[in-house]
Amino acid sequence: MTTSSRRNGRAQPTDPAALGLAVVPRKAAPGAPAATHVRVKLDHELRKLLAREAGTRTGTDPEDLHQMRVALRRMRSVLKTSGPLLGPDGEQVRGELGWLGQSLGEVRDYDVLIGHLREVVRTFEVRDQPAGRRLVSLFVAERGTARRRLTRALSDARYTTLLHEIAQLTHVPEHENTADPAGRTGPIADLRKPYRKLAKAVRALPADPPDDDLHALRIHGKKLRYTAELARSTAKKKDAAKFTELIKATRKFQTVLGDHQDAVVAAEKVRAALGKADAEVGFVAGRIAEHELAKRAEARAAWPKLWARIQKAADAVGAIKATTKPDTTASRRRGC
């Protein structure tokens, strides 16, 4: 069975029904087996991905690609933390999601860069804006190349196969296995692993951490957030608010470190473009690089306080073992 058709020579978006998905999204009661919650999460995120597929193909609104990528990342995260509950196929699907994520991520990075640089250029004096637009046009051309690679990926049989494999994982067996092969006891246990990884990464940072280390922190924070979202769906109503606070804290943490990474990438890209630029573009590029370095400094000053908020929220839901107190070393070391 094919999941997409062609009209006027163009592939059409995938029909959820062609993947065997039910008309109504699946639901799971808080007391349902953990594996069922994982399958329901995959069902919801797969539908979100499909809903954004058409817009991603056309490229009219960058938000479509962004949301398609978010859905993909959430599926990868849930398969990383809870995939063993679904059997051996989960890891294979996670690997294939990584393949698709590379194509989506490349275009998304250019979308973010171009959108941000256009905003910065609009703040310049009128006489400098034409040079700024010429600089941005260099990245628009590079994005076009990346988008063609993405279009080929979405038209590849490998993508169609991946969609079917995800859909297969969403199907709840008649007798769902309630055994926990990883030895976990519930959502709190699920949270402990990503929290420990984030905490360990924070403790390992020097006083002036490299940019790549802060980017890694953001990734750890994102994994903790996605795991907390799944845990909230399995939690009792009286505990859900605690998970919500952890989700909010990690989201803010992600945002600040995301701003840091965007500034780092923008400065690097602008510097790399200087070899292709004339004097006017070079002058504007220098101003943009200075602007991005200031943003980078702001983010570096802000994130430690947000880490303290995550620690407090994680402690409230029991993600920090009773024998382990929140570590405030990082905040003290940075004067926060």
Image: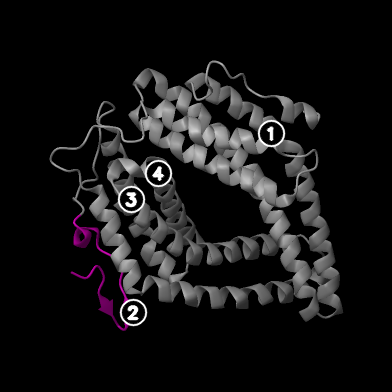
Q: Amino acid at mark 2?
A: Arg
Query: Which mark is on residue 10?
Result: 2
> Secondary structure under badge 1?
helix
Q: Amino acid at mark 3?
A: Gly
Spatial CA distance of label 2 from label 4 is 32 Å
Mark 1, residue position:
203
Indicate the position of residue 321 as horizontal and vertical percent values. 52, 20
Quick check: marks 4 and 1 in contact, CB under 8 Å?
A: no
Q: Which image quarter is the N terminus in? A: bottom left
Q: Residue at x 53, y 25 (%)?
A: 314
Indicate the position of residue 162 as horizontal and vertical percent values. 32, 62
Q: Amino acid at mark 4?
A: Val
- State the colouring used for the structure image: one colour
Q: Mark 3 against mark 4, which lies toward the viewer?
A: 3
- In the picture shown, does residue 329 fall above or below 217? above
Quick check: marks 3 and 2 in contact, CB under 8 Å?
A: no
Spatial CA distance of label 3 from label 2 is 31 Å
Q: Earlier in the sequence, mark 3 or mark 4?
A: 4
Query: Which mark is on residue 90?
Result: 3
Sort mark 4 into few (<14), some (14-19) or many (20+) by Cα contacts within 10 Å: many
Inspect the magenta stretch and tell me whether residue 16 lies in it.
Answer: yes
Spatial CA distance of label 3 from label 1 is 32 Å
Indicate the position of residue 217 as horizontal and vertical percent values. 63, 43
Q: Earlier in the sequence, mark 2 or mark 1?
A: 2
Question: In front: 65, or 33?
Answer: 33
> Secondary structure under badge 4?
helix
Mark 4, residue position:
78
Residue 129 visible in the displayed image: no
Question: In front: 82, or 181?
Answer: 181
Q: Residue at x 61, y 38 (%)?
A: 253
